Each structure stands twice: as C-alpha cells, then as structure tokens.
Amino acid sequence: MKIKHAIVAFTVLALAAVVLLAKGPSVKKMSSYGYIGRSNGATLIVDMDLARFRGDKKYIPIGIWLGYNESGVLKLNRGSFTLTDPAGKVHRLPSPKELTKGYGPTMISADYTYYSQIYDYGSMAFLSYHYIPGVAFFANTSGSPGILYDHVELPMRTFFRSIVYFKNPAGKADGTYTLTFKDSKGKVNMSIPFKITWSK
C-alpha cells in the first residue's frame, strides 16, 4: 500500500510540474498600467499608460522595459515583438515610414515627451543591471532619440527602455491584448496579456 501511495503522490507531483510548465512565463500586474513577466532569464515589463490615450488613433504606443540575466547575449530586433488584439489579430511593428504617415511625427514626438516625463518605475526591477540607453524602434524626428537603434544585444545583467507601436484597427476595444516577445536566437518566447483602460 505504501508503494502505491508513493506512486500516486509522485504522479500528482509530476502532473503539477507539467501544469506549471505549461503555464509558461510568470506574469503579474506591477502598477496601475504595467505588467511584468519573467522567463528564461529575461524580464519584460509592458506599460499601457500611453496607449490608453490613443484609442482613436490608427496606432497605439506601448512602453516596454526588457532586461536579461543569463550568460551569453540576448539578441532582438523589430521582428521580436508582436501584439495580438482582442479579436485575435496579430500585429507586427510597422515600418518607421508607415508610422510617420499613419500616425504623424507630432504624435510620435508627444509620445516620447510624455514617456520621458512619467515615473520610470520599471527600472526598479533592474537595480543591479546596466542600462543601455538610446534603444529606439521608432525615431523621434523632432527630438531624442533621433535615430533608429532597433538591433539590440543584451549581455548578462543589462536592460533597456523603449516604445513600440502597433496598428489599432479595433479602436478602443475591450478585452485582452497580448504582447509577445521572441528573441532572434530562440532563447526566450514570452507572452504578456493585459487590458487597456482606455481614457474617456
């Protein structure tokens, strides 16, 4: 009987471990507008503070912090990020030209200004990391950052902060959005679900 109980207990623990692994990265709410996820040495923070004011625009901006704490280098680029909207449509980053045409340089500049002024709470998750400045998937034509820096390498214990944009065909849609990050070498595949509390 003891052997049978031991086998049952082991089976339950094994199934629990499988369930935990199936859940993927650890994701939780970090602030009023931010969500944090951790997976395979990477930490990603998604902030929708900017997005909530842009529900009537063709594109929405999302603030991100991304750090890495494993040996080797985490490599990423414009293709590393996608956004799945509540309707299930998957959006990649638009080209800088597409964004400038469909959203406008004035709006981009305003987003960067707002982003630079809000409290940088996300950096608190990377206190022992080295900050990599200037990462820009979209340049600010009327200020800083004025050039693209969209092929990024993150050595161990480094992080950056930036803005990513995605198409917004659904407008102020209710429901869950999901930001997915995949590095170019397949080390990390992480999805962070969140809801946007649209400003009225």
Image (cartoon, rainbow, N blue to C red):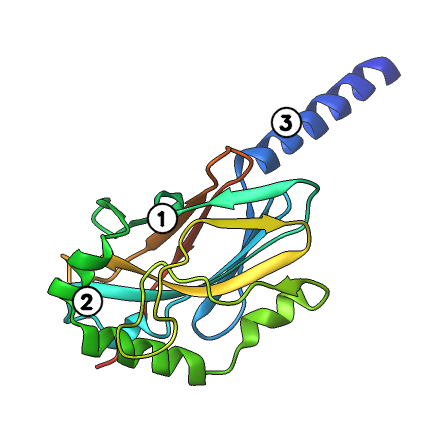
Left or right position of 163 against 173: right
Q: Residue at x 15, y 69 (%)?
A: 57
Mark 2, residue position: 172
Q: Secondary structure at mark 1?
A: helix
Q: Let me know if residue 168 appears in the view.
A: no
User: Residue flagged by tag 3: what amino acid is it?
Assistant: Leu
Q: Secondary structure at mark 2?
A: loop
- The dot on residue 78 is 1
- Of residues 106 and 88, the one nearer the viewer is 106
State the residue lying farthest toward the bottom: 117
The residue carrying pointer 3 sits among few (fewer than 14), some (14 to 19) or many (20 or more) residues within 10 Å by Cα, namely few
Q: Measured along the vertical axis of the image, is residue 194 above or below residue 109?
A: above
User: Are the residues tagged 1 and 3 within 8 Å (C-beta)?
Assistant: no
- Of residues 72 and 118, the one nearer the viewer is 72
User: Residue flagged by tag 1: what amino acid is it?
Assistant: Arg
First in residue order: circle 1 vs circle 2:
1
Q: Let me know if residue 34 appears in the view.
A: yes
Q: CA distance from mark 1 to mark 2?
A: 25 Å
First in residue order: circle 1 vs circle 3:
3
Left or right position of 188 against 99: right
Return the x and y of residue 68 as percentages of the image width and height. 62, 51
Q: Disc 1 or disc 2, which is closer to the eye?
A: 1
Return the x and y of residue 183 as percentages of the image width and height. 48, 41
Q: Residue at x 53, y 67 (%)?
A: 133
In which image quadrant can residue 49 be found? bottom left
Q: CA distance from mark 3 to mark 2?
A: 40 Å
User: Residue flagged by tag 2: what amino acid is it?
Assistant: Lys
Q: Residue at x 38, y 52 (%)?
A: 179
* Image quarter of the C terminus: bottom left
Mark 3, residue position: 15
Q: Measured along the vertical axis of the image, is residue 20 above or below residue 103?
A: above
* Image quarter of the N terminus: top right
